[in-house]
Amino acid sequence: MTRTDLHEINRVSWNAATVVHNSHKPDQAGFLKSGGNTLFAEELELLGDLRGKEVVHLLCNSGQDTLSLAARGAKVRGVDISDEAIAFAKQLSADSGIAAEFERSDVYPWLEAEIAAGRQYDIVFSSYGALCWLSDLGRWMKLVAAILKPGGRYVCMEFHQVAMIFDEKGVPTYDYSMPEPLHWEVGISDYVGDSCGALVASGEAVAGERFVNPNPCYEFQRSMGEIIGAVLQSGLRLQDYREYLYSNGWKPFTDMKSLPERRWTVPDGTPKLPLMYGILAVKE
């Protein structure tokens, strides 16, 4: 069941967090205008050649990755529920001179409107902490499949569900799959500030005061079987699935080992575990 009521609670929490997240990132427009790109190699490999492709970036946040897709030759539309994120993305597009369309909407009604209008895309893209905000994953995947052209691709790069079992100290705390939404009284955190600069591509991270979000949020945690099952049940063909023993940007645990290219992994001597996964699924 789609929980629009919880999506709206999350929208308010995201509005507060988004302002703080962007406060850590210096001169984003100048960075993009000069050829900077916020995408990591892993998603670019799954995305393939973007030149001339019609792409929709769902749950696009503040548009940095969306504009990075556009800079690689794609015609891109970004969609996000946060008012602050979309306002920032539109301004960033104008200031950087990189063209993209941005729409503020819950993705479910947006997808339904696209289907009703008969619009389809070459690529649907979602990444890094997107799926956990979707209350009905099965419905989402069927809607995504419906807006893909024949031969179109769904590309997803996400943080691994195994990592979500642990708290920030690396202690097993949460169930692998949760039938009920996970409620956080203290809402979306300043994970950009906590990343020690790994989520800041445009220069040295700008320090700020400790942020505590006064607005609660809800997450929807699922197993990898549920996620891959939703892809398969949508009618798409799973072409590629990859797991990574490191995390791009996000620092999931307090005690982590820094790697080159703004990545994190568990410390030496600690059992390795998957921290990210990538999915490529095709509409036949």
Image (cartoon, rainbow, N blue to C red):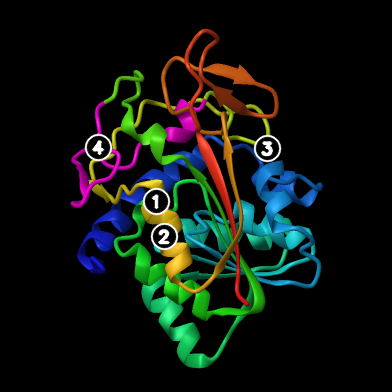
Task: Indicate which disc, 1 or 3, sits on the residue closer to the N terminus.
Answer: 3
* Label 2: which secondary element: helix
Q: Quadrant of residue 71?
A: bottom right
For label 2, the crowd category at 10 Å Cα-Cα, with few meaning under 14, some 14 to 19 and many 20 or more, is some
Q: CA distance from mark 1 to mark 3?
A: 36 Å
On the image, numbered disc 1 is attached to which residue? 225
User: How many angstroms separate mark 4 from mark 1 (CA)?
Assistant: 14 Å
Residue 246: x percent and y percent?
Answer: 57, 29
The answer to which of 190 and 152 lies nearer the viewer is 152
Q: CA distance from mark 3 to mark 4?
A: 36 Å
From this view, report whether residue 137 is shown above or below residue 202.
below
User: At label 2, which amino acid type do we have?
Assistant: Gly
Q: Are marks 2 and 4 in contact (CB under 8 Å)?
A: no
Question: Upstream in the sequence, badge 4 or badge 1?
Answer: 4
User: Which tag is nearer the camera, tag 3 or tag 4?
Assistant: 4
Q: Amino acid at mark 1?
A: Gly
Residue furthest out toward the top: 269
What residue is pinned by disc 3?
Answer: 202
Marking on residue 229? 2
Quarter of the view holding residue 243: top right
